[in-house]
Amino acid sequence: MSAGTPTARRTVLKNWTTPALLISLGTGLGAGLGAMAPPAVLAATQQVSYVRMLPQTSSITFTSATSDTVTYGSPFSFTVTTSGTPAPRLTKSGLLPVGVKFTDNGDGTATLAGMPRGRSEGVYPLTFYANGDGFARQSFTLTVNRAPALRHVGTVRASAGSPVSQMIEAKGYPAPSLSESGTLPTGLSFTDNGDGTGAISGTPATGTGGLYPVTITATSSQGTDSETFNIKVREAPVFTSSPSAAASTGTPFSFTATASGYPAPTITKSGTLPKGVRYRAATATFSGTPRAGTAGVYTITLTARNRSGTVTQTFTLTVS
């Protein structure tokens, strides 16, 4: 630059808010603090000034409700509405239930619609956004109510003396309460966890072998559901009859061997019986009339057997 030529000074006015010197950019050049205006030449001072924009005030507002409650498996439609000119573009964030879609209608409204299905249930927090001559957002809650539905259990198999735990689950919203009816084996109990789940657990006591029908019911404001299933407690055989019996020659005799266990055990025998006496495995019964000359002691081995185990007993028949 040649000597004697005046130099224009360039100053950036970042925080100067004197109204007379603020330069409005209008909506066409953007909004918000930090955007810089084109240079304004101040003739009196030959200074070029860059003036910060004032923030734009949004004219967009949401006018629709902030929540909606729908029913699982039933079609529904909810309209999101806004005010503002020109009509803003609408978008959303957040997970939607399976079977539900969000659609911007292009006129300042949007549609949330469909039929909740699959695993849909509960509360879905969403956020709606409106962009146009300004910006706005709205927090929205979509609630999907669902009638209780118990998960199939089937037969519960347990063994006497061994711990068991069977989980009970029910879908539905609000979370259903669970209840149990029917006689449980001694040592087992039912617990409702208060969140749509529960459990039958414990240790079946000795001697509880058997089949126990049980009904579970799930209940909420949306309805009820119930399921009946069996608890099958297996138990190894245990002889419950006496290990000895007495008979007399010439006198009718009958004795039945018994054993507990589940399933019901079969009882077989091995060993020699006095003449006139026989054993019927179908009823586990000794019967007949010992003949003359058969007096004596007869040692018999009885075997009780089921799917849970096998046990033997030495049985003594004394004939006098």
Image: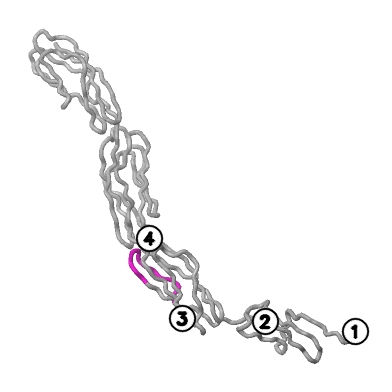
Q: Residue furthest bottom?
A: 44
Q: What is the quadrant of residue 187 in the picture? A: top left
User: Which of these two is toward me, 62 or 164?
Assistant: 62
Going by the numbered disc 1, the residue's amino acid type is Ser
State the SS at label 3. loop
Q: What label sits on residue 53 in the rendered view?
A: 2
Viewer-nearest of discs 4 and 1: 1
C-alpha distance separating marks 3 and 1: 61 Å
User: Which of these two is toward me, 156 or 49?
Assistant: 49
Residue wearing tag 3? 107
Viewer-nearest of discs 2 and 4: 2
Q: Where residue 293 appears, x then y in whole percent?
A: 11, 7
Are dots 4 and 1 in contact, CB under 8 Å?
Answer: no
Left or right side of 154 for 25: right
Viewer-nearest of discs 3 and 4: 3
Question: In the rendered view, would you say 51 is above or below 313?
Answer: below
* 2 or 4: tag closer to the N-terminus: 2
C-alpha distance separating marks 2 and 3: 30 Å
Q: Where residue 248 appears, x then y in whole percent?
A: 11, 13
Left or right side of 8 for 142: left
Are dots 2 and 1 in contact, CB under 8 Å?
Answer: no
Residue wearing tag 4? 173
User: Which of these two is toward me, 72 or 37?
Assistant: 37
C-alpha distance separating marks 4 and 1: 83 Å
